[in-house]
Image (cartoon, rainbow, N blue to C red):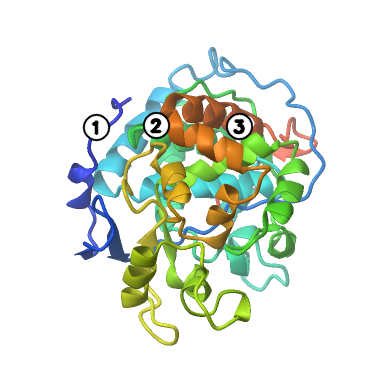
Amino acid sequence: MAAPMSSSCGLHTSLTHSIVSFPLITASPYFLHSKCGTSCLATHANTTRPPRQLSVNYYAKSCPQVEQLVGSVTSQQFKESPVSGPATIRLLFHDCFVGGCDASILIASKGGSKELAEKDAEDNRDLKVEGFESVRKAKELVERKCPGVVSCADILVIAARDYVHLAGGPYYPVKKGRWDGKISTASRVASNIPHANSTVDQLIKLFNSKGLTIQDLVALSGAHTIGFAHCKNFVARLYSYRGKGQPDPDMDPKLLHALRMYCPNFGGNSDIVAPFDATTPFLFDHAYYGNLQNKMGLLASDQALALDPRTKPFVLDFAKDNHKFFQAFVAAMDKLSSVKVVRGKRHGEKRRDCSMHM
């Protein structure tokens, strides 16, 4: 795996979309013309089951090179299209929080079917294609070496870990042994995805329903250290927060002014996106939390974490200590990727093509 990056500069030239330098915010923030859809973490109110038979060495005999195979794809994808990182991490969140970590997010809707698959739910339509492509390419390579052995669900978890590390974050062991789910329906998604203006109460309730703590919530929100959000996800904060005709008072004035330049109240380019982390938008680090302290959170649901007394202590801790953030993030990702794991032929399958049920 690549060593953590000391600078994000090399990534800028890899993006094919135009980048607009934005001097009103400190430390090199950027706006992109992109279809880059990243909003808040997806959650789904299901009961938590303890992980069953997951193991770091699950494929030690059946496909010992699985992580190297996936890694060869993710490293190439990251060089060619850095947005593959946040796209794949977000894809994992959306998979695990809606029905468990079973790759149901990857299933394509069937033509003529009355029920759309998860990926075609309204709240999932701006998921970036680079996330899906990362898993598809990795699966194709793994299938050539170990046909019918490794699940799409495991490949997605491995790929997300790889991208965290490639962007400068921690490298951590991934437990494997998930099977792919047999159910993927759009109707499960809408009511279980938190919105950009979700309250801390709503977020805590949703994360608790997955067996995730308040610390896990704040640590996983740190995935917003990379990635971007469309104007529609925060435009209300700029002009009429909570319908009061005034901008959000908990937004830094310079950030507010800069965002208004690219995100008008009405009209404008719907493809414009802004970075969650305006200071180091391509580097996986703890700057996100320092931004929250300085009222530079992009989404209302991000900034709220620095204001609520239940979440604020963790924001302060992670802002001060990058290592502590990494430790908490790794622990939370381990718990997240073990949510409602599918095991065995009765409940699961091992898809050859991740977009199609067996």
Q: How crowded is mark 3: few (under 14 residues within 10 Å), some or many (20 or more)?
A: many
CA gap between label 3 and label 2 equals 14 Å
Q: Residues within 10 Å of mark 1 (few under 14, many from 20)?
A: few
CA gap between label 2 and label 1 equals 11 Å
Residue for badge 1: 6
Whether residue 150 is visible to the viewer of this picture, yes or no, is no
Residue for badge 3: 332
How many numbered dots are placed on residues in this image?
Answer: 3
Residue for badge 2: 169
Instruction: Identify which amino acid the numbered label 1 is placed on.
Output: Ser
Residue in front for this viewpoint, 344 or 270: 270
Q: In which quarter of the image is residue 287?
A: top left
Instruction: Identify which amino acid the numbered label 2 is placed on.
Output: Gly
Q: Earlier in the sequence, mark 2 or mark 1?
A: 1
Q: Give residue 339's position: percent from left, percent from top.
A: 70, 36
Q: Is mark 2 on a helix, strand or loop?
A: loop
Residue 287, above or below 175: below
Q: Give residue 13's position: percent from left, percent from top.
A: 17, 52
Q: In which quarter of the image is residue 197?
A: bottom right
